[in-house]
Image (tube, rainbow, N blue to C red):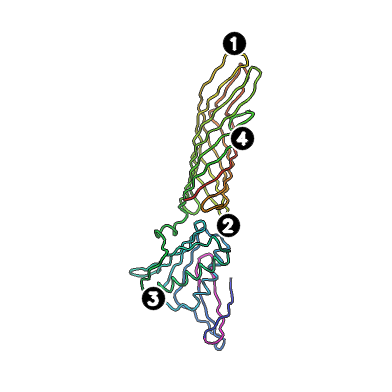
Amino acid sequence: MIITHRCRLGIAATVVLGLCAAEGTVVAIVKHPRTMGSIALPGPVSVRVVGCGSEFAETVRHLLGIELAQRRRQTSVSVIVCCDGSRIGIVVREGISIRPRSVQRRVDGGYLSLSARARLVSLAAAEMVALVDRRTPTPLRSKVRSATRFTASHHRLRLYALARFGLPTSPARADYGAAIALAHDLTTIWGWRVDVAGQYGTRNVELGSASSLALSVAVAATARYEPVRSFRLAGGLGARVGAVRFAGTAHDPETTAEQSFWNVWFGPIATLAADIGPLWRKLYATLLVESGYAAPAATADAGSTRVLSIDGWWFAFGAGLGWQW
């Protein structure tokens, strides 16, 4: 993509910025109106934007290319911009050096629009590039706690509390419960998720009623996709193992025996979770859809009639809140 920008270099000149989005490299070329010659400025700047959304990344690359169009240093510099909620971390360091110098800064752009936030980041990054070029240590008031805090911002931990509805118990009149889940992003795509869930279901039968209490633990490997900063999808494949307690209550205990027992079930699962937010600070809303297959099955019978079971395919739905670290 070629972007033309009018600026003043003593006289009017046209700065043509060639932005290579795939490589994340910004190369500035100045065309002088008198000579119409092209001069490639030395010192390429590598720009990497992580977790901020494609629109924000393109805007930052464009604005940063304009800010660095007159850069004359020969050394290559890498600029890394990483978003973590409303906080934005910026790391600038030399690409090739015996003792590479780097500067780090954190800004809060949660109250700004996307264009204003991108402008703030580009100005801060340009100032940091100038500091690296001068090779003079300058104290920064707001430093990132560690270089890996934002250069690896995908290492995020989220704790969820959800209400669950639906199966696995079938054919229950009502099946509801709750779950606590922990999710960790290992890379920009891959991660894992663990949850502990409990569900309760009941069903009326001819001689009384039957109930089930299912407790289970699930582990899944996840892959996530974040089209924008405020929305992300995470799909997962794994397994769930649990124990269920079936109990029967008779209308007439004198003529009908009541019984309760525990059974074990397990099987593969597939999950799809959507996170929206942050709603406040690092608080997110989350929705969950889960499907699985129970094998072996856990069943409860009244005489020769099966009244409750965890058997075959099942589905569950969840909604709740999550907090990110």
The amino acid type found where label 1 is placed reads: Glu
Magenta region includes residue 20: yes
For the record, the magenta segment spans 10-26
Residue matched to label 3: 134
Mark 4 surroundings within 10 Å by alpha-carbon count, few (fewer than 14), some (14 through 19), many (20 or more): many
Work out whether mark 1 precedes mark 3 in sequence or the reverse, and give the earlier one: 3
The part of the image, by quadrant, that contains residue 95 is: bottom left
Q: Which mark is residue 254?
A: 1
Residue wearing tag 2: 228
Residue assigned mark 4: 166
The residue lying at 50 percent from left, 41 percent from top is 181
Disc 3 versus disc 2: distance between alpha carbons? 36 Å
Q: Residue at x 56, y 16 (%)?
A: 258
Mark 1: which secondary structure? loop
Distance of mark 4 from mark 2, alpha carbons? Answer: 30 Å
Counting from the top left corner in percent of width and height, residue 110 is at: 54, 60
The mark that comes first in sequence, 1 or 4, is 4
- 30 above or below 104? below
